[in-house]
Amino acid sequence: MAEPTIPPFETTALDAIPKIASTARGVFRTHKTKNLQWRKVQLRKLYWALHDYEPQLLAALKADLRKSAFEALLSEVDWLKKDCMFMLEHLDTFARDEKLRAPHVPAHYSILNFRIRKDPLGTVLIIGPYNYPVQLLLAPLVGAIGAGCTAVLKPSELTPHCAMVIKQMIEDRLDRDAFAVVNGAIPETNALMAEKWDKIFFTGSAAVGSIIARKAAETLTPVVLELGGKNPAFITKHANLALAARRLMWGKTMNAGQICMSHNYVLIEKDLVPMFIECLKQAYRDMFPEGAQKSPDLARIVNQRHFQRLKKMLDNTRGKIVMGGAMDEKDLYIEPTAVLVDSVNDPMMTEESFGPIFSIYPVHSLDEALNVANLVHRTPLSLMAFGSKKENERILNEMTSGGATLNDAYFHGAVNTVPFGGVGDSGWGAYRGKASFDCFTHFRTVAETPGWADGLLAVRYMPFDMKRLRLLNKLVDKKPNFDRNGKVVKGVGYWIGLALGLGAKGVKGALLRWAVVVLAHYLYKVRAGK
């Protein structure tokens, strides 16, 4: 079967970008995107577009990253079809007004009919990365459509075949005025950033993310930043080493390790290192019986620049390569590689690999491992922990990360319906599942005061009356059950409850319960000042 034809990469004209943005804003001002049926039609069209353009998308992913059809379907095309179905199934519930009741609204304000209305933010800009050029560009679009926004998409120029197929697909199937695709590199991105957006969603490097955030701040534009980080994997003496090695090998070979959640380094107790390395080698042999380069399943590095970046890390390391190490620049191939290091200042520890290479750093204890991880990157996008339940919970408690997976590699980010996002230096905001809808939605609090209620609310009108205010406070304010030192003070209700619940029987029990009631009555009189 012949490969589908993909048009050559074309850059969007700079002078066309202001009109593209203006058109999308104009469509939003017509209010038609607020109609749930319109949103559902666009989501259905996107679903069938993904289905019909599947051959072109698979061919583009193969051309840009040499992704196998299996991986391309699993993590990109089928993933997005599931996203569309999930949003369609739950959109009515997500978009429905939420009535606010106790404990959110005090009882004396319940007549005001407080509710949360879900409003679309407006026109949004979505900037995608190269590693998952289809999924990470269109998954936010599913949320934007569901929320009722219009959108302009900017695919990565590093995956030009995918960029052109996506442009063709979106313009062919969706509302062409509400949704558009701009192709290009830095000049086109700068032109897009010169426009006013209601939100910007960016996935990519921290360096570019900081530029996006600074530019957005000039116009008070909210941003979602899905960045990366030097992600740690912890392995303790209670771990199953063979299982940990197999699962971490999976995490570093999917998409040739070009995954923002994959581990940058492994922190492992020193005595376990030799056995862990042997387990890694066995996992390698199981996955690549004829070698990784001959495998039809392993993707390639996106381009020569990133190949050279990874090669430089391996060339400059002071550590020892204990698995892999082979490279072929013409093929953009780097073998899955593990490097044993002994310094946190080694390039394999200080730089984010974003490829099929990682370091192994021996430690003497979990205390040392946590100290190293917090020193290398205090807020990574993800962490992985292989150990006992107690050890894993301690790691979660003492290490901050965008997400975490226990006893596996980044499964917290491998399911399309659960929230995903970074924290601190690894990103701001979250999406996927309901979080995708929330990401592009303004949650507007609405109160509705009935005309007959004015007498009940008269205390607010001038001239003010302090007596009426004090009376109102007595009726509605709760008294603190704690003293000035923050200590909880047990009140009358506690002692009465204790008396009624005492288990002593007979005369002794009766006398004890009576004594507690008398004490409670005394405490009540003391507090009342009688």
Image (cartoon, rainbow, N blue to C red):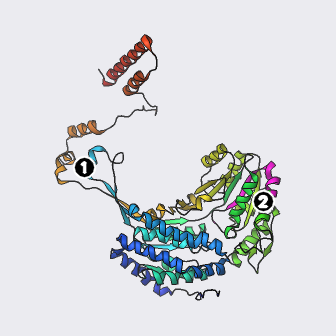
The amino acid on which the numbered mark 2 sits, given as a three-letter code, is: Leu
- Residue at screen point 62% across, 47% down: 398
Q: Which residues are magenta?
A: 258-278
Q: Position of residue 446 (x, y in %)?
A: 30, 58
Q: Position of residue 86 (x, y in %)?
A: 48, 65
Residue 28 painted magenta: no
Q: Which residue is mark 1?
A: 111
- Residue at screen point 77% across, 61% down: 283
Q: Secondary structure at mark 1?
A: helix
Residue 261 painted magenta: yes
| Quadrant of the frame with the N terminus | bottom right
Q: Is residue 277 above or below residue 506?
A: below
Q: Which residue is mark 2?
A: 280
Asked whether residue 500 is in view, the answer is yes
- Residue at screen point 50% across, 73% down: 126
Asked whether residue 380 is in view, the answer is no
Left or right: residue 104 compared with residue 53 = left
